[in-house]
Image: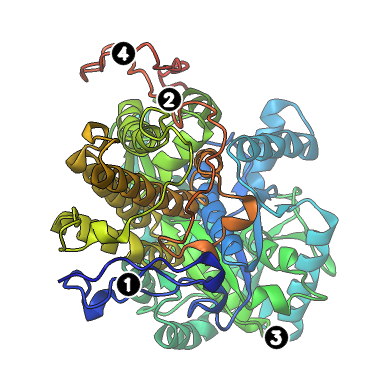
Amino acid sequence: MRTPLRIITRSRKALVIWRQSAFLSSRSTPRRVNRTSSEVCKEERSSYITTPIFYVNASPHLGHLYSAVLADCMHRYKLLQGVESRFATGTDEHGLKIQQAADVAGEDPLTFCTGVSQRFRQVFGSCDVSFTDYIRTTEERHRRAVEHFWCVLRDKGLIYKGSYEGWYSTPDESFLTPTQVADAVDAMGQPIKVSLESGHKVEWLKEENYMYRLSAFRTQLLDWLQKNPRAIQPDRFLQDVLQWLQDDLPDLSVSRQRSRLQWGIPVPGDPEHTVYVWLDALVNYLTVAGYPDDHDHWWSVARHIVGKDILKFHAIYWPAFLLGAGLAPPRSIHVHSHWTVNGTKMSKSLGNVVDPVERSQAFTTDGLRYFLLRQGVPDSDCDYTDRKVIKLLNAELADSLGGLLNRCAAPALNPTQTYPPLCPRSFTSEQDGRAVPEDYRMLDAVRSLPTLVEHHYESLHVYKALEAIASCVRQTNGFVQRHAPWKLNRTDAGDRRWLNSIIYVSLECLRIYGTLLQPVVPRVADKLLSRLGVRADERNWADLDFLLSYRGRTLGRDTGVLFNRLESPVGDEQKPRKMKKTDNYPKALNLGTRS
């Protein structure tokens, strides 16, 4: 026989417990989720998360936004846990490509960089990317950091002047070994050499540059990765780095002659040379941390988010520079793959580059964020189409989550607009018990959901966290549908108690979902929690104890549909849903792709 539900008051901060229940096993014993004492945050109360700084030779696209939204999700999640969090993004503004792009635009380099950098900032702002620091490599604070870092490496004997000869890729701003290039044919049918990794054309170049003794760090890099197997995630990218380290590392050219590259930071003590753009750019992470004066606190908890195309720079060159300077490598490097469009790489020439501002206007800011984080799988490329966005958002935000809220908060079903009383005896096998095994499985899943979501947020597998939340939302909808509270007789005492219990449990499930979704869809989550009457100081990770005593609490004001369904573009093969008079369908703005 199941013992009745026992409600513990919020002031005692405990969970509802089903004692001596077959529903509970040792595996599913209720856990407190007060994150002020969680295992994750026991040793550190600070977090420093970074995106790459984005190259300003072109306007921001969907891939840039994905990196930024991933980092923003981690930052917001840490804040919910009560952690002091710093989140940095920005723009990389030096290098030959920028110099050439500014010439084509007929502008001086700084004016050109300022314009493009502002576009990145506007895109991130319009998509609720809540960075705490926006760094530009043209800032004076960054110049000071780069100069100091260079001098530390130089004074340790790790930088020397030498002649370098090899294949050079201007778009990649890097020299390549003979094994990294291949024969190809250009658009005119002429034979050329290209980078195997990027496909960009390379040219043979010989010049006198400053060199970094990268060859001295292969053993140290291997030792770092062996002692820190989670330093590079996911594992497939760690394996790539370990494979690269099987071969000897050649010394790295870390300057360019000033005659070829004027747009950059001059080498300290030698104005005839310019600091290599990647060394310059990578130091930005230290600049934001406070280098060289006061950086230890933030640098000790640094986590980078990078695209797979710049893995070698972040997982080999950057740790080698840091070790040479006497600094620790970053705490972790989280790598993500790329976005394609209809299975094809985004390209200006193909006219299929996705404009993030345009799409956020079409699908709402939270809609675009949800799609990117729900569909973005770090270790494999992800494909974007407008139809995928519409299908996902309609199914999970509008219909499943929004529909559940509409049912439970509708005046017809909840005329008092409150959390009605929960009858514990409804969840027993006694005479008044109405719950079935599926209901207990749903409650078990929701109670364990915060721990599961925490695990996935920590590893930046946000798509897995959203998959788990969406599954629980479906189970809660199934719970409501299964028992059809709208068919119950309010004049019957037993029916009334069961109806109130269904509504109470469903509202509590929604409160858990809304709290967990805040890092992903902050506006939708705020609207949901406000409708539930959850105060701003009750929306933290410490408030995720399931089935708290909210009895009698008044719901918040009804501000309309949680998330409006989206129309399919013309020619969509999906059959449109029959419209109700109460439906409010936003027009999808210019759903065709553009360059």
Residue beneath label 3, please?
157
Whichever of callouts 1 and 3 sits on the residue coming sooner in the sequence is 3
Residue beneath label 1, please?
239
Q: Disc 4 residue type?
A: Met
Q: CA distance from mark 2 to mark 3?
A: 62 Å
| Mark 3: secondary structure | loop
Q: Residues within 10 Å of mark 1 (few under 14, many from 20)?
A: few
In front here: 505 or 280?
A: 505
| Mark 1: secondary structure | helix
Residue beneath label 4, please?
579
Residue 255 appears in the picture as rendered: no
Q: Nearer the viewer, mark 1 or mark 3?
A: 1
Q: Position of residue 453 (x, y in %)?
A: 39, 62
Q: Which mark is residue 12?
A: none
Whichever of callouts 4 and 3 sits on the residue coming sooner in the sequence is 3
Residue beneath label 2, please?
564
Q: Position of residue 306 (x, y in %)?
A: 50, 58
Q: Disc 2 residue type?
A: Asn
Whichever of callouts 2 and 3 sits on the residue coming sooner in the sequence is 3
Q: Residues within 10 Å of mark 4 (few under 14, many from 20)?
A: few
| Mark 4: secondary structure | loop
Q: Nearer the viewer, mark 4 or mark 3?
A: 4
Is 91 left or right of 320, judged from the image as shown? right
Q: Disc 3 residue type?
A: Gly
- Identify the residue shown where x is 30% and y is 42%: 496
Q: CA distance from mark 1 to mark 4?
A: 51 Å
Q: Nearer the viewer, mark 1 or mark 4?
A: 4
Residue 59 appears in the picture as rendered: yes
